[in-house]
Image (tube, grey):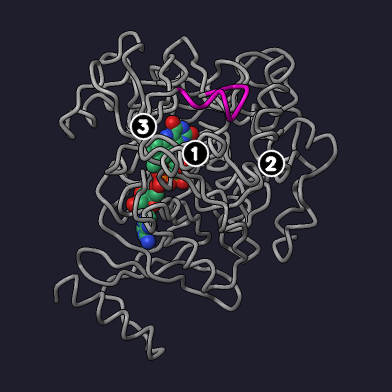
Amino acid sequence: MERKDYVALLQECYAYGREIAPLVRWQTDLLILGAGVAGVYAALWAEAQGATTLVVSKDPLPSGSTPWAQGGVAFPVDEADVEAHLRDTLQAGRGLVEEKVARSIVEEAPLHLERLLRWGLPFHPQPVREGGHSQARVRHLGGDRSGLWLLRGLLARLNRLPLQGYTALSFLLAGDRVAGALLLGPEGPVEVRAGAVLLATGGFGSLFPVSTAPSGATGDGMVLAWRAGAILRDLEFVQFHPTALPNGALVSEAVRGEGAVLLNAFGERFMPRYAERGELAPRDVVARAVFWEREQTGGTYLDLRVVEHLEERFPTVVASARALGLDPTKDLLPVVPAAHYVMGGIRTDAFGFTGLPGLYAAGEVASTGLHGANRLASNSLLEGLGYGQAGCFGCLARLGRGELRPATAKATRSGGISLHRAGSEAASWGSFGRCARGNTAAGFSGLCQGTSPAGKALGQPGRG
Ligand SMILES: Cc1cc2nc3c(=O)[nH]c(=O)nc-3n(C[C@H](O)[C@H](O)[C@H](O)COP(=O)(O)OP(=O)(O)OC[C@H]3O[C@@H](n4cnc5c(N)ncnc54)[C@H](O)[C@@H]3O)c2cc1C
């Protein structure tokens, strides 16, 4: 039977509530659905802890939005910058960011950077500034191929590569527990039984007519979780990137950090009329301004001619423009707002727990509370790293294979994050208070001086 026939058969089964007989059955400790930054980083942690781990991706690798990320990852540049990064995150989120969540992610960020550098990921030493950031703190790799280089670097460290071409269709339930998933693979339906499932299936940007997201960003994970009874929140908070080419190809915000300006159809620079920070105002402000200027003047353009080393620094942008017959070293680029990132998603706690026993979520599919109503630029790859790790720890605790490790030193001292939200998994939180003082290999002073349990984990031997 061909794949399209299976899809039709499965749709029919759903419609009439019939059982689907799998052709193949697999078993694993941890099933990770999605092979973007969140899924792959989680898998690295799980492998290092000795859990059998299966990662699947419905699209060919490198898949998801991760390889499309251009700007990079936001990391505080030094200890003093932690508070400033946090402030920028809160400000961008329009009062809806959960400060405790944001603080834990930002405080942990240097530990991830430290580890990635130790693994040899070639982050450019000079951070750049993006919209909404009060200073240059976004680290990029491979010019503007940050996500691709990051993902390749992570994939290269996995013992077992993700399986490509396997689409999760529904969860397997054992009572009220998520105990695996039914996948559609090249060989037909596959049943995977798992001790825990981590959803890392990304967002739903491609449901919009103009989107920077790849076509596979269809919100599958949110649907699966919702069908199984998880809570979805803030789905109305979709971030529109202010500067996409008319075909949805992204023109990174970083070009504006390097001096590119926005012009309307009359050739006027308009952003200073809308915001003090001009082109570097938060994304929602710039996207609204671009929308209004298009409505009022008939067009909006980005002038990249002033950007130095354009071809070397932004090869993807240059290639995308040339594909439309434009030369960004000479021509103005027509730009439109495009659906870019989903702030909402499956509500999770500090360990990616969704409230459904056995089900965890990380990355863009999750609503952790970090972004509030509006994501700060380059905070999502960071969240993928932070919650990939935290979600893995949540799953491992569920499997009885490790302690839950709180994300911050502060959390250790206070004895726990979000215990009240742990719900029916409360039993697995029993070990929470037992986290010992950690010893970490590196990081900057104060943060990594032995109080962070995640720092302890980073210092453990494993792959890398
Ligand atoms: C053009 C663009 C540029 C961006 N630039 C930046 C940036 O510079 N900095 C930044 O921080 N963020 C950026 N973002 C956002 C960021 O890239 C994403 O939020 C992030 O990569 C999401 O990672 P993820 O692991 O959650 O999911 P993704 O990377 O989207 O991966 C999703 C995975 O799930 C799989 N999948 C989906 N459905 C199923 C299913 N049913 N069954 C099995 N597998 C499934 C996919 O095949 C894929 O492997 C950008 C986004 C875009 C689109």
Q: Which residue is mark 1?
A: 287
Q: Residue at x 38, y 91 (%)?
A: 16
Query: How many dots with numbers?
Result: 3
Whether label 1 lies within 8 Å of ligand 1 gets the answer no
Q: Which residue is mark 3?
A: 265
For the question of whether residue 55 can be seen, the reply is: no
Q: Do the residues under discs 1 and 3 have CB atoms within 8 angstroms?
A: no
| The label number, if any, that marks residue 208 in the structure image | none
Q: Which residue is mark 2?
A: 94
**For the view shown, which residue lies furthest in the right direction?**
414
Amino acid at dot 1: Ala
Mark 3–mark 2 Cα distance, whole angstroms, equals: 30 Å
Q: Residue at x 43, y 48 (%)?
A: 339
Which is more toward the observer, 196 or 311?
311
Q: Specify start and end residues of the magenta stretch as a single range.
A: 269-278
Which is more toward the observer, 110 or 231?
231
Mark closer to the chain start, 1 or 3: 3
Amino acid at dot 2: Arg
Q: Quadrant of ligand 1?
A: top left
In percent of width and height, residue 354 lies at 62, 59
In the rendered structure, does residue 277 fall within the stretch colored magenta? yes
Q: Secondary structure at mark 1?
A: helix
Amino acid at dot 3: Ala
Q: Which mark is in front, 3 or 2?
A: 3
Mark closer to the chain start, 3 or 2: 2
Q: Residue at x 63, y 46 (%)?
A: 373
